[in-house]
């Protein structure tokens, strides 16, 4: 009996120790607020930061993994323009572009969405490189294949940047970059890839909206939340899909700008802005 009691005490102590090793990060502010994109980014082989994009002020912030500020209010060289160009910050890195680990650089352009300016910027606002009208190649399953094509690829001769330039030509320019891609530098599938595979139209709208998810999964539960300019939630409803499209009616709201998030199985899948003009 005494041995059994000692065994039970030891087991309880082991369980308590095991549970004590499992910690939960405390999110100290609403990271998933509408108007923002949030995801982790690997800026070096040993350094991960949280990235939060503010499409309302055309800036972004970097936070440490304990949610303390690392860099704040970093302005992008031109507006994000999420509906006309899908301009995005991409490839944040300490050494990929200039091999100077004291700075952090990033590329800024539109993934595979027409000819737009392509920038390489430092977070201090210094412009390292710009092409006024370049096509940044990105696709998944190009030409009905399985190839995942991205603008920067690691090769046995270093990292290469692929850009179609100048405009309206088929000239492919290949640039050698100073550094190498850290592992999992940018999870394109979780953010950019999904943004290109969700569309809401018409926008501006008179009230009736059609939502299309090209990589729609019938097993998933989809919902949408709508917010006003002060980020107050006005609508939250489940989306019912027929042939990969769903619809909602916001004609009862006043004219203006609204923000939305689409959720898949409870996780934020896509966010954007809607203009209501009746």
Image (cartoon, grey):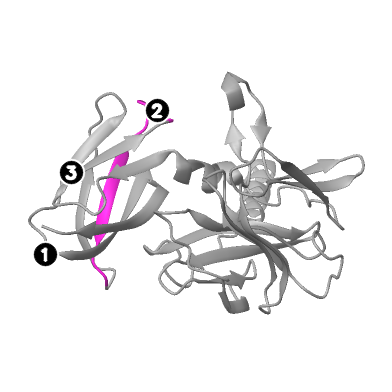
**Contact? badges 1 and 3 (CB < 8 Å):** no
Quadrant showing the C terminus: bottom left
Magenta span covers which residues?
A: 215-229
Q: Residue at x 14, y 64 (%)?
A: 255
Q: Where is mark 3, residue-wise?
A: 248
Most foreground residue, 45 or 136? 136
Residue 227 falls inside the magenta stretch: yes
Residue 158 x, y percent position in the rendering: 88, 47
**How many other residues sit within 10 Å of disc 2, few (<14), some (14-19) or many (≥20)?**
few
Q: Is residue 78 above or below residue 84?
A: below
Q: Nearer the viewer, mark 1 or mark 2?
A: 1
Q: Where is mark 2, residue-wise?
A: 217
Q: Nearer the viewer, mark 1 or mark 3?
A: 1
Secondary structure mostly taken by the magenta-highlighted segment of the chain: loop
Q: Where is mark 1, residue-wise?
A: 254
- As helix, strand or loop, the secondary structure at mark 1 comes to loop
Q: Nearer the viewer, mark 3 or mark 2?
A: 3
Using the numbered discs, state the Cα–Cα distance from disc 1 to disc 3 in whole angstroms: 15 Å
């Amino acid at each position: 009996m005494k041995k059994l009691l000692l065994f039970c005490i030891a087991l309880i102590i082991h369980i308590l120790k095991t549970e004590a090793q499992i910690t939960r990060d405390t999110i100290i502010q609403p990271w998933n607020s509408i108007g923002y994109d949030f995801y982790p980014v690997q800026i070096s082989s040993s350094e991960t930061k949280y990235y939060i994009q503010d499409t309302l002020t055309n800036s972004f912030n970097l936070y440490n993994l304990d949610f303390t500020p690392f860099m704040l209010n970093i302005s992008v060289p031109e507006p994000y323009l999420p509906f006309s160009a899908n301009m995005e910050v991409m490839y944040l890195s300490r050494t990929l572009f200039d091999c100077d680990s004291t700075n952090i650089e990033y590329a800024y352009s539109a993934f595979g969405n027409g000819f737009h300016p392509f920038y390489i910027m430092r977070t201090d606002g210094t412009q390292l490189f710009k092409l006024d009208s370049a096509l940044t190649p990105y696709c998944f399953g190009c030409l009905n294949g399985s190839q995942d094509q991205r603008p920067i690829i690691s090769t046995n001769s270093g990292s290469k940047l692929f850009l179609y330039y100048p405009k309206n030509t088929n000239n492919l320019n290949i640039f050698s970059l100073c550094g190498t891609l850290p592992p999992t530098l940018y999870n394109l599938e979780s953010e950019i890839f999904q943004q290109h595979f969700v569309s809401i139209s018409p926008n501006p709208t008179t009230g009736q909206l059609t939502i299309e998810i090209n990589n729609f999964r019938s097993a998933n539960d989809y919902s949408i939340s709508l917010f006003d300019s002060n980020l107050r939630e006005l609508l939250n409803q489940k989306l019912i899909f027929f042939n990969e499209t769903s619809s909602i009616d916001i004609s009862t709201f006043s004219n203006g700008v609204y923000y939305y998030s689409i959720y898949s199985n409870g996780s934020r899948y896509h966010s954007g802005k809607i203009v209501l003009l009746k």
